[in-house]
Each structure stands twice: as structure tokens, then as C-alpha cells.
Amino acid sequence: MPADTLAPRPLQAALVSAKIVDAVLEAIAHGRLTAGTRLREEEIAGIFGASRAAVREALKALAERGVAVLQPNRGARVASPTEDEVTQTYAARALIEGAMAADLAQHITAADIRKLREHIGAQRRTNDSGERREHLRLMGDFHTLLATLHGNSVVTETLERLVARTSFMTALFPPQTQICAIDDHVAMVDALAKGDGALAQRLASKHMMDNRARLRAGASTPTADLRAALLP
Ligand SMILES: [Zn+2]
């Protein structure tokens, strides 16, 4: 039998890659995997019984999301954003989301407001039940929902990328207090419901700067046991 018939099929490799990506994101969201930890291809292949190609695919996908950094000849690491990168990313969100909120206040509908209030209900439920990863996802999702309601697909696409980056930063450097205060979201929706664009803009922008202030990027101790982090 030729050796290549024993190679994993493309679909299988894609599934294994997706599983590795998910395990890394899950480990970061739960604080088991820290900034700067080396992601050794061979070790990860061993942990998941995966091919090196499948691991490379997963690392590439993580790098595209800004979660991993690939260095030629030095392998991959969990990204380690600096204070400056964190500040600039949040400042970009404050600018875009402030302007977007001002605009949205001019054309938001009652059905939109209902959708936003229902979303806030789900945020409270996941916060109370302690589902951290799902809660983090919803907190980011609220902002992309505002973009969707605003209706400019280029803005939505840009914001989705920025939200993914700040969600990762939040997971890496967990704040002492609640990130994205749910009460801020309530106040923003109230301002939108009143059609008060100036207030909505101020609140949306301040919400981002407050979130930024809660994060302390910094050196963390690399995770020692990659297997225990990825397969708890
Ligand atoms: Zn928020």
C-alpha cells in the first residue's frame, strides 16, 4: 500500500485543526494559557495525535486572529500585546463606535431596540451563570450587533476584527472587575432609544476608554504544562 494513502484526509486534518484552534482559545479564555507561551508544533501534534501539517494550519489560523505570533525559525507563541497596542486598539474602537452610535441614533427602530434589550438579557444570564467564554463572546457580540443595525458593512467588518482583538486582550489580561459593564450597555441603548445621538456617542466612546483602563497588559509567566492547559 503506498504510504500516502495512510495520510490523514483533508477533511479530517481540517477538523483536527479546528479542534486545536478551539482548545487554544478555550485555554486562553479560562486563563490556563498565558501570553508569550511557546506553541511547539511537535508537542501540540503529540497532544492531539495530529499531523504536523494540521498543527501548522491551526497556528496559521490563530496568527490570522492575532492570537499567535509566528516567528521564522523560532516557532509560534501566544501573542503578547504591549500596553501601547492595547491602548491603540481600544482608541480605534472608541473613535469608530462613538461615530457609529451618533449615526445609529438617527435611524434606529423600535424592533432594533427590542433586539438590543434581549441581547443584554442574555449578557446578564451568562454573567450570573459564570459561563466565561460565552459571556465574553456576547459582550463582544453586542458591539457587532450595534454595527449590524447601523448598516454599513465595511464598518461592521472593521469592527468585527477590532472586537476579536480586544476580546483576546481581555482573555489574556483578565481585569479585576467586570469588563464591559452591562449597565453601560443599558445606558447606551437608552440613549439610542431616545434618539439622543450626542449622548450615545459620548457613552459609546467612554465605554471603550473605561474598558481600556481596566486592562493591564504585561509580562506573564509562560504556561509550563501545555498538555494540561489544552486538555484539562
Ligand atoms: Zn461593551
Image (cartoon, rainbow, N blue to C red):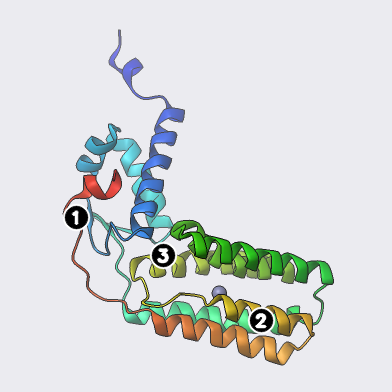
Image location of residue 162, percent across then percent down: 51, 69
Please, is residue 36 above or below residue 12 in the view?
below
Read off the residue under disc 1: 74
Q: Is residue 192 left or right of residue 223?
A: right
Numbered mark located on residue 64 in the image: none
Closer to the observer: label 2 or label 1? 2
* Residue at x 31% of width, y 63% of height: 79
Read off the residue under disc 2: 188
CA gap between label 2 and label 3 equals 23 Å
Closer to the observer: label 2 or label 3? 2
Q: Tell me, yes or no, if residue 96 can be seen here.
A: no
Image location of residue 146, percent across then percent down: 67, 70
For label 3, the SS is helix
Query: Which quadrant is the C terminus positioned in?
Result: top left
For label 2, the SS is helix
- Which quarter of the rendered image does ligand 1 occupy? bottom right
Most foreground residue, 95 or 1? 95
Q: Farthest residue toward the left?
A: 224
Please, is residue 17 above or below residue 70 in the view?
above
Q: Is residue 81 left or right of residue 132?
A: left
Image location of residue 20, percent across then percent down: 36, 43
Dot 3 amino acid type = Phe
Which quadrant of the view contains residue 15? top left
* Residue at x 19% of width, y 53% of height: 73
For label 1, the SS is loop
Label 2: few (<14), some or many (≥20) within 10 Å? many
Mark toward the start of the polypeptide (1 vs 3): 1
Mark toward the start of the polypeptide (2 vs 1): 1
Read off the residue under disc 3: 168
Q: Tell me, yes or no, if residue 183 can be seen here.
A: yes
Dot 2 amino acid type = Met
